[in-house]
Image: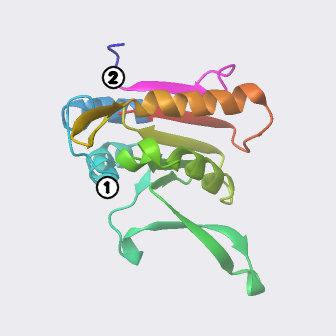
Amino acid sequence: MSTYPRWTYYPTRDPAPEWVTDIVGAVAQVQGELDSAKVRSLTSDRALSILRPGLEVVGFRIETGKAAADRITLPVLFGEQGLPRVRYDVDGVHDELGVLLEVEAGRGARGNAVYRDLVRTSLIVNARFLALGVMQEYHHKSSGKPIIVRSYDDAKDQIDAIYASQRLRLPFAGVLLFGY
């Protein structure tokens, strides 16, 4: 497939909302810096920094670093005096639309990050949609041999299974999976 980036919107019975075009367009604009089939050694932080300008233009707040002031922390549970008691960090959020953004790199290919992102973001207050970015390809070596992990395809299989089985119902109005 030659279209960049690859993406799928769930549930597949619904047309993709307009904000999907904004995210896909922001990813396409930086293909030369971000295309994991060609660019090596991308980390999720690097991918997010490349995507930040284009996503901010369309209304997203994006994490700018790992210091507390740079992170985006959203409430999950509230405690005494109505103060947030449990919070989770996200890579980005479009507050008006309720779209949460998570971008994964190599760890996402093999570390169950897709499942973690689905569960954690489903618990965040006012999360209506999840936009999940994963590498199209993750290149690494095992015992000196080059390995290519098709992260997007693996994540798509996982999310396809969730939606097809209907045993696990996600609380989102929709999920965008995109492969960068």
Determine whether, in the image, residue 160 is placed left or right of residue 110.
Answer: right
**Residue 15 covered by magenta stretch:** yes
Residue 43 shows up from this direction: yes
Residue positioned 69% across, 42% down in the render: 172
Question: Judging from the image, what secondary structure is the residue with disc 1 in?
Answer: helix
Residue stretch in magenta: 4-22
The residue most toward the top is 1
Q: Could you classify mark 1 by the number of other residues whose Cα lies within 10 Å: few (under 14), some (14-19), or many (20 or more)?
A: some
Quarter of the rendering occupied by the N terminus = top left
Q: Residue at x 74, y 45 (%)?
A: 171
Q: Which mark is residue 45?
A: 1
Instruction: Determine whether 28 is above or below 75 in the image.
Output: above
Q: How far across and down, in percent of the image, does residue 120 sit? A: 62, 56
| Tag shown at residue 20 | none
Is label 2 in a helix, a strand or a loop?
loop
Q: Is residue 127 or residue 157 the one in the foreground?
A: 157
Q: Position of residue 96 (x, y in %)?
A: 57, 50
Left/right placement of residue 72 relative to residue 163 reads left
Residue furthest out toward the right: 167
Q: Is residue 127 above or below residue 145?
A: below
Q: Is residue 59 visible?
A: no
- 17 relative to 77 in the view: left or right: left
Residue displayed at 25% across by 31% down? 31
The colour style of the image is: rainbow
Which residue is depicted at the point 69% across and 38% down? 173
The C terminus, quarter of image: top left
Mark-to-mark CA distance, 2 and 1: 20 Å
Amino acid residing under circle 1: Asp
Q: Is residue 113 left or right of residue 118?
A: left
* Residue at the extreme bottom: 81
The residue that disc 2 covers is 4
Q: Position of residue 6 (x, y in %)?
A: 41, 24
